[in-house]
Structure formats: C-alpha cells, structure tokens
Amino acid sequence: MMSKISTFIAGLAVGGAAVWYYAKRKYAFIAEQEIASVKEAYAQSRPLQEKPASTPAVKLAPGVVQDKPSIVDYAKRVQEAGYTNYSNSVEPKTGVRPGKLPYVISPDEFGESEEYAKVSLTCFADGVLADEYGEVVDNVEEIVGDALEHIGEYEEDCVYVRNDARRCDYEILEDLREFAEFQKALPPNR
C-alpha cells in the first residue's frame, strides 16, 4: 500500500513538472510573438526614416531585428530635443544661472512659495540698498536685477522681486532718508 502511494506521488510530481515546463515554453513563445507583432505594427505606423549605414543591427528574438543607433547619434538627438546640462548651468563669475535673472512680481505672489526665503530690503534716497540690519547689498544687479526702477508700480514706495537662482523673494521698501541718517538711528554694538 505504501509503495502505491509513493508511486502515485512520484507520478504526480513528474506530471506536474512536465506540465509546468510545457506551459512555460508555450506562453513564452506566445509572448515573443505578441511583442514581435506589436513592434512590427509600430514600425509600420511610424514614418520611414533614413538610417545611417554604420548603425549595427541587434538581434532581439528569433526573426526580430532592431537597429541600434550609435552613442554619438543618440547624444546629437538628445541635444536637438532641448537637453540642458544642469551640471554646467551656473556661470562661474556671478554664480547666477543663465536665464534665471531676478524679476518683479506682484504683492500677491510675494511669499507664496514656501521653498523661497522672504527677505526685506530698504532702498535709501541716495540709492544705497541695505537689509534691516544696515548691511549694504553690494551686488544689486545680481540680487534684485533692475527692480529699483520699478518701485511704485504695484504699491507706493515698494516693489517685490523674485530671484529663482537664490530661491528668495525680496520686498524692497523705499526710504526717503539717506543711508547715513539710517546708520545714526541704529543701536550701537550691532
């Protein structure tokens, strides 16, 4: 009785393995055929393009061949599609990314992005731009661009500027005093 059961279990295991192997091969073959037919239909729907003679062909599956472009052709195609090399996107002299110049924004836009720091600056009557601690901004063009020419466009005595390169929103308030008068008003030992 025991040998009949063990023979039955052994036959069941061998039969199960044979069915599994057969099903695996059958469905792998069906999948390859489906993939090949989709690739063929896609290739027929695309407009024919001139292919360079130096492009090697790569054999993917039985009966299916796909042309593989050279790395030079691929790089050229990527650059023509508008690729930006972000590792070289900062100009070494100014530290400002090209195309990311400061620009005037509306009062409603000021501080709307939590990713941007909010900074308050003061433009004095003598043209000096400083922060609330009296520190003078030396590189005005790099920090706020031509924003000082736009004071009063949205609000009287004020302009708002966004600097994407520095990730800052600047509020620039106009002060009718000279910078020297402001310095006198600062507490000693600042």
Image (cartoon, rainbow, N blue to C red):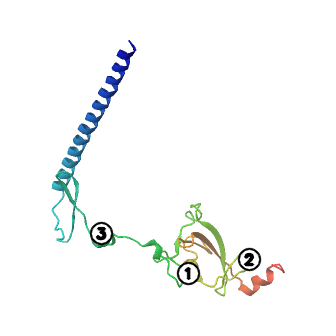
Give the foreground label among 2 and 3.
Answer: 3
Characterize the local packing of mark 2: few (<14), some (14-19) or many (20 or more) Cα atoms within 10 angstroms: few
Tell me which numbered mark, 1 or 2, is placed earlier along the sequence: 2
Q: Residue 174: where, in percent of width, then height?
A: 65, 78
Characterize the local packing of mark 3: few (<14), some (14-19) or many (20 or more) Cα atoms within 10 angstroms: few
Q: Label 1 to label 3, Cα distance in Å?
A: 37 Å
Q: Label 2 to label 3, Cα distance in Å?
A: 54 Å
Disc 2, SS: loop
Residue type, label 2: Tyr
Q: Residue at point 45% right, 72% down?
A: 86
The answer to whether 153 is drawn above or below residue 7 in the figure is below
Residue type, label 3: Tyr
Q: Residue at point 21% right, 59% down?
A: 66
To which residue does mark 3 refer? 74
> Are the two marked residues, 1 and 3, in contact with CB atoms closer than 8 angstroms?
no
The quadrant of the picture occupied by the C terminus is bottom right
Q: Residue at point 31% right, 23% down?
A: 11
Residue type, label 1: Glu
Tell me which numbered mark, 2 or 3, is placed earlier along the sequence: 3
The answer to whether 96 is drawn above or below residue 39 in the figure is below
- Tell me if 104 is positioned left or right of 59 in this view: right
To which residue does mark 2 refer? 133
